Amino acid sequence: MCEQDQLRTMTENKRINDPEGVRRRIVDAAYDAFVTQGYLATGMLELRERASVSGGAMAHHFPAKRDLGLAVIRDRVSEAVRQTWIEPLRTCADAPTAIDSIFESIIDELTDKGRVSGCPLNNMAMDVSHHDAEMREVVSAVFVAWHEALSAKFERDLEEKQASGLDPHSVATLVIAAYSGAMAMAKARQDVGPLIECRAELATLLTAKYRRR
Amino acid sequence: MCEQDQLRTMTENKRINDPEGVRRRIVDAAYDAFVTQGYLATGMLELRERASVSGGAMAHHFPAKRDLGLAVIRDRVSEAVRQTWIEPLRTCADAPTAIDSIFESIIDELTDKGRVSGCPLNNMAMDVSHHDAEMREVVSAVFVAWHEALSAKFERDLEEKQASGLDPHSVATLVIAAYSGAMAMAKARQDVGPLIECRAELATLLTAKYRRR
DNA sequence: ATAAAAACAGGATGATCGACCTGTTAGGAA
DNA sequence: TTCCTAACAGGTCGATCATCCTGTTTTTAT
């Protein structure tokens, strides 16, 4: 007898429709499972159990697995990238400061957790971009948003004469690539070393382009 | 009626045992499929058809799928990394020259092919490193070999006074991470742009550390 | 009030997965 | 030659996969 049956018994067989809540529970469970196990390695049955929803409810909200994948990327992965990488850029003094503190907090977080499950966006990208063109587009859009935010910050720093002699577009690409790649290495080795080293290298690289730091 | 049946009929029911050949065909087919579609997304049946081997032969050479995965990493992926990244480092003038020409040839190759299927090592790493600890170890070993070769070259350049003021270990990590990450972005976007930009950024970064280039 | 639609329950479906089975043949050792 | 084992053939197995079905209840629209 599951939790909902108990509730229904106690409250005289009253069922409560909660579409937003059920949907949120499904997407939350899926985001967690996709990031830690991978999209392909996670079955719909496991997701139903994690979210405690019936097959009917699952099919109602997400008729196919790819719909759930798209929702996870759009609602959770893009939000994670925004909170982790884009938001800090708005309040910081300059791009290098933001990048360094982002690396620091991620390294600390992974050290505390004790294991490296990888960058959510990168994990989804690798699992998904083989076959499904639409999902690849959505993933690509998150990469673009990430790159645009970082690139724009470098450009602003240039205009404010904080930095000189750098190409905002390609530097932003390097930072994202270095982070994604370092996370992939860290995941394979289960060791934050690559992140620490890339953080240091990016710091010295950017310091050279910025005045008195 | 398959090819081998025809052959057997023509040659009076003679079957030819070719263990090395069959094994090679299986690993070749698996490497190609794993790199282009992913490890999890590829079924054993599809592999049998690609390699034109029976279920019995497949089970004889590779009792489980993970055995085949391990063989692909050990025999093909590590060799691909060695040929692409480690071998060029032996004959080149210095590390930056080698890195730049490696990026160039890969960019050219992808441009010709018209699509980006990603870095073989990175693809396997992401697909595999979730659940199976042994496969993660093997992948990790390839990363380590790659990093050691690159790191050793930077060290040699330092000793020969070609470069100064750089940490061979962390610079090597940055190069590998930037390449892996750029490849992941290129795969998601199906566009070599990220590789071109990272190539340029790495070139200017390394030029600053190397004398008169 | 009543009809329509959305939200959910619970189970069934065929397809495909990886693994494994029994039997047969080739090839080398004795 | 005899024998034994590796090499292979071809099929089967239960499990799991994603999807879809019918039926019931809740909510909304009119």
Image: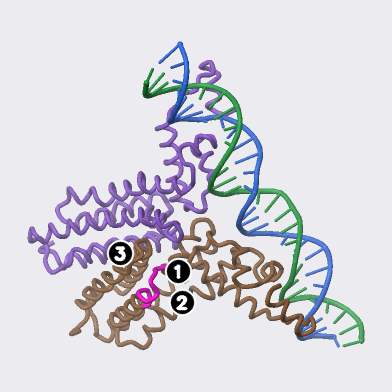
Chain colours: A purple, B brown, C blue, D green
- Return the residue at label 1: B121
- Circles 2 and 3: CB atoms closer than 8 Å: no
Q: Which residues are magenta?
A: B109-117
- Return the residue at label 2: B80
Give how far apart the Cα atoms at labels 2 and 3 are: 24 Å
Viewer-proximal residue among D23 and D7: D23
The structure residue drawn at horizontal position 59% and vertical position 63%, both measured from the top left corner, is B66
Which subunit holds the residue at mark 3?
A: A
The amino acid at mark 1 is: Leu
Give how far apart the Cα atoms at labels 1 and 2 are: 9 Å
Q: Is residue A6 left or right of residue A85?
A: right
Which secondary structure, mark 2? helix
Residue A80 is labelled as: none
| Spot occupied by residue C24 in the image (x, y as percentages of width and height) | 83, 73
The amino acid at mark 2 is: Ala
Which secondary structure, mark 3? helix
| Spot occupied by residue A189 in the image (x, y as percentages of width and height) | 44, 62
User: Crowding at label 2, few (<14), some or many (≥20) Cα neighbours within 10 Å?
Assistant: some
- Return the residue at label 3: A198
Which secondary structure, mark 1? helix
Q: Is residue B164 magenta?
A: no
Residue B133 in view, yes or no: no
Which subunit holds the residue at mark 1?
A: B
